[in-house]
Amino acid sequence: MRTKTASSKGKNISNGWKVNTVSLLKEILNNNPGMGTMSQPIQIFANILYEVATRANELQDPKLTALMCRLCLFEESDPYSPNYDGALTNKVINNAYPELKEVFGA
C-alpha cells in the first residue's frame, strides 16, 4: 500500500513535519466545546503514546526515535519542557533522515 505525501517543488517533505502531540491533545480538549466526552479516550491515547515512546527509547532504533522526537514525545524534543534540547532533537532527526538536513538544520 502506498501512502500519500506532501511535496514542495518535487521534494518529499512529509518527514519534515513536527507535531507537539501533548499540546495538540490539550488544544483538542480544552478549546473545543462539546469535547468533554472525548477526555477519557484522549487520555487513554496519551497513555498509549507514552508507552510507545518508552518502548522506542528501549529499542534505540534511529528512525523510530526520530519519529518520537517529531511527535515531541521525549522531554528533550518538547519545546515546552525545561529539558528541551533542540540541537539534540535535530541531530537525532538528521541522523535518521539525512535528506532533511535542510529542514532541521545541520
Image (cartoon, helix red, strand yellow):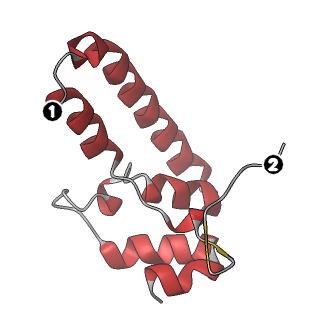
In this rendering, position of residue 42 left or right of residue 71:
left
- Disc 1 or 2, which lies upstream in sequence? 2
Horizontal side, residue 42 vs residue 81: left or right: right
**Dot 1, crowdedness within 10 Å: few (<14), some or many (≥20)?**
few
Q: Is residue 31 left or right of residue 97?
A: left
Where residue 42 appears, as percent x and y from the top left, is 34, 23
With respect to residue 102, does 67 lie above or below?
Answer: above
Real-space CA distance between mark 1 and mark 2, rounded to the nearest whole angstrom: 34 Å
Residue 66: percent from left, percent from top: 53, 61
Q: What residue is rendered at 30% in x and 54% in y?
A: 75
Residue 31 shows which numbered tag?
1
Q: Residue at x 39, y 53 (%)?
A: 19
Q: Nearer the viewer, residue 9 or 76?
A: 9
Q: Amino acid at mark 1?
A: Asn
Query: Residue 105 appears in which quarter of the rendering?
Result: bottom left
Density class for disc 2 (Cα within 10 Å; few <14, some 14-19, many ≥20) is few
Q: Which residue is mark 2?
A: 2
Please tell me whether mark 2 sits on a helix, a strand or a loop.
Answer: loop
**Residue 74 placed where, x, y %?**
37, 52
Comparing 106 with 16, the one in front is: 16
